């Protein structure tokens, strides 16, 4: 037999140096064909279906597909050449089509049901049982269990929802660009600092105009409402922004999302009812840690009750400060960011820039690896022999007890054609089936400014927090002890809890005991003075209760819209929630919902609360570490045993209880936002 020349089909770590975009489609086609063959074998002879011939065979086929696809997806995001941009959507389309076809395969569903019904099911290992339960739930939520006519209706709704989501997004894009103001005299923009003026000048240039221009894109809108001294200008931008894509405001009715939202909500409710759920929120929460909408509502309302007094106080403080500067009271919505920024400058005046010498990149990584070493006994050993996609990329073997257990790729610097932002990605998942074995490997990708030649790389504190956050996701993946990738690491972990490890690790970027170890001045080796750490923390908490109430308002609004069992006026729902929890002013015409992409063109429907839910867990867990010792090995082992290593083989609510010994509490979260714990 001829050895397979396509490097995307090779075993082991990706051979980045050999892979060409032209290999991608062929490799995906082959993987999909192998996977389809496996499914055909499973469904051809249902009588023979057993745990190995169904779950293990599918797991191996899925792993082959995932390893090939993750390499393609990764190379596409870190080297966005025209060639990669061309083949990526082709591959994605094939995979999406395959998954949708598989999710509607009734014979495969029957095979899983048969495994679940076996008398020896309960004696199977936890990972195998979890795998089967997850698959069954996915099949059911995909409508495969419905009678034929309803199944067809369910599928049609999916198609319609996908096109409505697109339409919703396009309306926002169009509305964002359609509202434009041009400025020929810098005085019209008095108050904007230099960098914000440059931003608006750049927008004018891109539009083929001279001087300055602003539309409703978030950076432009933010520059105007935060800094423009001209109150009427701020008011115009605020009104235009909160009425985007709606029936009111300067472009009333032009890109109106009102009917789009109403149809989306009605169709989601119809799907929920087809599957036997009371509401769409009930449907979505079957795969979450918060198991009922009422639990989420209680959580959010409790939080809002305890944040409200402090938020009112912060608003009053802002009004007093604005009055001293000659503002007309009461403050209008377009005054909040403007005076807020002035108050922040006066109270804190902290610049991230002056702290950078304490956050030299190598020191930060030494700190990061020290945390991992003390808590989990891990050692990160650089290996320059491993093939990468760019000379700046580093690879580390992760060792525990002298043995290699995992691997980590670090790609830290921004480059042309590399996607922006910071993220953790899966390269290989832990797998052990028979003789097939694979260790987990993660990608940690950031976009820091590269250092000048011969100069050290200095980070802003925000960047340090980002590294710890993404590293938390990496550890969740790398410390897996589960043999089946579908339920190991972050796979299958409830969506409202998957940010627990990442947000927890941010704690080590803020704690004095931790910073003393790694935040050392690049020239003098002096530790970071605690007064500056205090200033950083004060900056984080500035108007914390007001910010928290805003998040609660969005989350409650999302929940109310998606737990309603009959048609509602979305704007009226938003207004009722605002009146119940908010303290900040809002204009009567506010149509914020019409631009709320998270809910109508993103994955956050009935899920916006997840940010706060996971943060509650993370803050509570970090407080526990504070009690045990931030570098306590036993505490680290406990976290690894109960949460990081178990993946989704049991519900997070159980893992949490096993870890913390009780339900999560709000107090540490309140404190993080500068709210009195006794509130
Ligand atoms: Zn994250």
Image: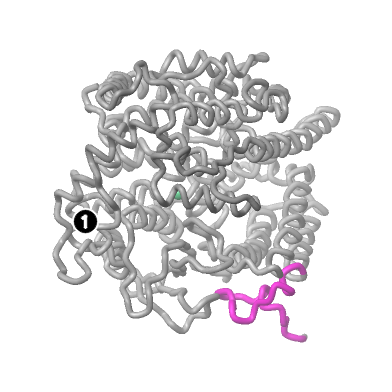
The residue at 33%/32% (across/down) is: 340
Figure check: 302 above or below 186: above
Q: Residue furthest right?
A: 149
In the image, residue 11 lies in the stretch drawn in magenta: yes
Front residue of 282/86: it is: 86
Q: Position of residue 435 (x, y in %)?
A: 57, 71
Q: Quadrant of the N terminus?
A: bottom right
What is the secondary structure assignment of the residue under circle 1? helix
Which image quarter: residue 584? Answer: top left
Q: Position of residue 6 (x, y in %)?
A: 71, 78
Front residue of 320/581: it is: 320
The residue at 53%/33% (across/down) is: 607
In the image, residue 88 lies in the stretch drawn in magenta: no
Which image quarter: residue 412? Answer: bottom left
Q: Position of residue 448 (x, y in %)?
A: 42, 63
Figure check: 360 above or below 528: below
Q: Quadrant of the C terminus?
A: top left
**Dot 1, crowdedness within 10 Å: few (<14), some or many (≥20)?**
some
Which image quarter: residue 258? Answer: top right
Q: How many marks?
A: 1
- Give the magenta range: 2-25
Q: Which residue is mark 1?
A: 514
């Amino acid at each position: 037999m001829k050895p397979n020349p396509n490097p995307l089909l090779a075993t082991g770590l990706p051979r980045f140096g050999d892979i060409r975009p032209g290999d991608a489609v062929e490799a995906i086609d082959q993987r999909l064909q192998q996977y389809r063959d496996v499914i055909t074998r499973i469904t051809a002879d249902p009588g023979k279906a057993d745990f190995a011939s169904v779950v293990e065979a599918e797991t191996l086929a899925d792993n082959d597909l995932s390893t090939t696809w993750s390499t393609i997806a990764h190379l596409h995001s870190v080297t966005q050449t025209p060639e990669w941009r061309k083949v990526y959507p082709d591959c994605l389309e094939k995979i999406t089509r395959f998954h949708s076809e598989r999710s509607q395969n009734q014979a495969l569903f029957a095979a899983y049901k048969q495994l679940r019904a076996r008398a020896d099911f309960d004696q199977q290992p936890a990972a195998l049982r979890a795998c089967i339960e997850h698959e069954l739930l996915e099949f059911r939520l995909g409508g495969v269990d419905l009678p034929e006519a309803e199944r067809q209706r369910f599928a049609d709704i999916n198609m319609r929802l996908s096109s409505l989501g697109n339409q919703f997004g396009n309306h926002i894009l169009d509305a964002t660009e359609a509202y434009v103001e041009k400025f020929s005299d810098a005085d019209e923009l008095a108050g904007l600092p230099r960098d914000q003026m440059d931003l608006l000048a750049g927008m004018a240039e891109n539009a083929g105009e001279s001087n300055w221009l602003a539309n409703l894109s978030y950076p432009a809108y933010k520059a105007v409402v935060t800094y423009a001294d001209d109150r009427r200008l701020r008011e115009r931008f605020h009104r235009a922004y909160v009425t985007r894509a709606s029936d009111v405001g300067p472009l009333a009715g032009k890109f109106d999302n009102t009917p789009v939202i109403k149809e989306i909500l009605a169709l989601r409710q119809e799907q929920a009812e087809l599957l036997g759920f009371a509401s769409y929120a009930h449907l979505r929460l079957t795969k979450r840690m918060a198991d009922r909408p009422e639990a989420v509502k209680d959580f959010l309302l409790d939080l809002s009750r305890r944040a409200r007094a402090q938020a009112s106080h912060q608003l009053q403080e802002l009004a007093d400060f604005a009055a001293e500067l000659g503002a007309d009271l009461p403050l209008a919505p377009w005054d909040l960011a403007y005076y807020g920024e002035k108050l922040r400058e006066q109270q804190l005046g902290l610049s991230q820039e002056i702290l950078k010498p304490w956050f030299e990149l190598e020191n930060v990584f030494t700190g990061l690896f020290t945390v991992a070493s003390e808590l989990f006994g891990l050692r990160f050993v650089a290996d320059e022999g491993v093939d990468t996609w760019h000379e700046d990329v580093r690879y580390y073997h992760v060792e525990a007890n002298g043995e290699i257990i995992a691997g980590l790729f670090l790609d830290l610097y921004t480059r042309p054609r590399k996607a922006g932002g910071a993220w953790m990605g899966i390269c290989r998942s832990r797998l052990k089936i028979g003789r097939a074995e694979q260790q987990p490997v993660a990608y940690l990708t950031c976009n820091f400014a590269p250092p000048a030649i011969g100069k050290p790389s200095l980070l802003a504190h925000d960047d340090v927090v980002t590294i710890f956050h993404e590293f938390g996701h990496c550890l969740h993946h790398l410390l897996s002890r589960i043999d089946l990738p579908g339920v190991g690491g972050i796979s299958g972990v409830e969506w409202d809890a998957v940010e627990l490890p990442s947000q927890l690790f941010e704690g080590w970027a803020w704690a004095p005991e931790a910073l003393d170890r790694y935040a050392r001045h690049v020239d003098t080796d002096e530790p970071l003075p605690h007064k500056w750490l205090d200033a950083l923390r004060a900056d984080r908490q500035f108007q914390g209760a007001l910010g928290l109430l805003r998040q609660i308002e969005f989350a409650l609004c999302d929940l109310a819209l998606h737990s309603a069992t009959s048609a509602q006026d979305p704007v009226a729902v938003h207004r009722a929630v605002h009146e119940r929890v908010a303290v900040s002013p809002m204009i009567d015409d506010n149509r914020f919902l019409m631009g709320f992409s998270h809910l109508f063109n993103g994955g956050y429907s009935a899920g916006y609360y997840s940010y706060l839910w996971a943060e509650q867990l993370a803050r509570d867990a970090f407080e526990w570490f504070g009690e045990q010792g931030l570098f306590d090995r036993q505490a680290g082992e406990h976290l690894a045993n109960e949460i990081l290593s178990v993946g989704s083989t049991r519900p997070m609510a159980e893992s949490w209880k096993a870890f913390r010994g009780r339900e999560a509490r709000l107090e540490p979260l309140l404190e993080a936002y500068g709210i009195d714990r006794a509130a």
